[in-house]
Image (tube, coloured by chain):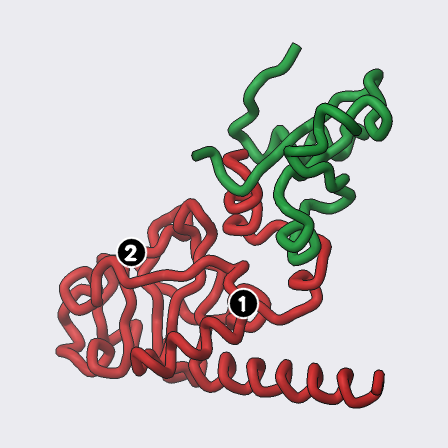
Chain colours: A red, B green
Amino acid sequence: MDGKLDWLAAGLPTEGMNAERPRAGTVARGDVPTCRLDEPVGEVRERVRAARWDACVAVNDERVVLGLLREAELDRDGGEPIERAMRPGPSTFRPHVPIVEMARFMVAHDLPTSPITSSDGRLIGVLRREDAVRAADQLHDDEVRNKEETH
Amino acid sequence: MPQQIHDRREVKALMDSGAQIVEVLPREEFEEDHLPGAIHLPLRKIESEARRRLDANRPIVVYCWDSA
């Protein structure tokens, strides 16, 4: 183990103040649709829409993230393979990142979704900006309330 | 005999078998996040407190922030 950072980045359990606070890995949705590189966009698009999602993550057999498809990519020609349509090598985030930090980053960079992966690149889930902002706001409200109750 | 461990699964196995897990980072960092059951023993206090606080008859795993 290469230190605490490696443990955190793998999404393993911890103790301490941050363990009780929401993080990228706890707020991310694990039910995000995934697809293979050789699948045609049309088939993936149908699957994504049926699951009521607007994003899909391209992964390999070990669930390592290879690419990301949002609305624009999913709207491409149905016969095109995922490998050509996707955004390759998307920016990913580790599960231990505090949700407040994620919310700020996603708002500042106008990211609707962000893949959350372990330190070896395996998909844990996709964090949606609205979920990150909501969780960050809730955390703030809870902490304000706790402070008021102790005074 | 001290040895370096790079595999977190090995750390987990040692934890499960009763090893003492020691974090040497400052208190504030320890209180934010630490491995389950970890003992806080900052680096500057290792020499003066390790013998008193740790059991020499059990394995001891010491960790920092990263391997740098």
Classify 10 Å Cα crowding around label 1: few (below 14), some (14-19), many (20 and above): some
Q: Are marks 2 and 1 on the same chain?
A: yes
Residue at x 56% of width, y 25% of height: B5
Residue at x 49% of width, y 39% of height: B66
Residue A38 position in % (x across, y down) = 22, 58
Residue at x 68% of width, y 61% of height: A19
Quarter where residue A113 is shown: bottom left
Whether label 2 touches label 1, CB < 8 Å? no
The front one of B43 and A41 is B43
Q: In the image, what residue type sits under mark 2?
A: Leu
Classify 10 Å Cα crowding around label 2: few (below 14), some (14-19), many (20 and above): many
**Quadrant assignment for the N terminus of chain A:** top right
Of tags 2 and 1, which is closer to the observer?
1
Quarter where residue A120 is shown: top left
Residue B37 shown left or right of residue A77 in the figure: right
Q: Which mark is residue A66?
A: 2
- Residue assigned mark 1: A98
Q: Is residue B34 visible?
A: yes
Subunit under mark 2: A
**Quadrant assignment for the C terminus of chain A:** bottom right
Helix, strand or loop at label 1? It is loop
Residue A47 position in % (x across, y down) = 37, 76
Residue B36 position in % (x across, y down) = 73, 46
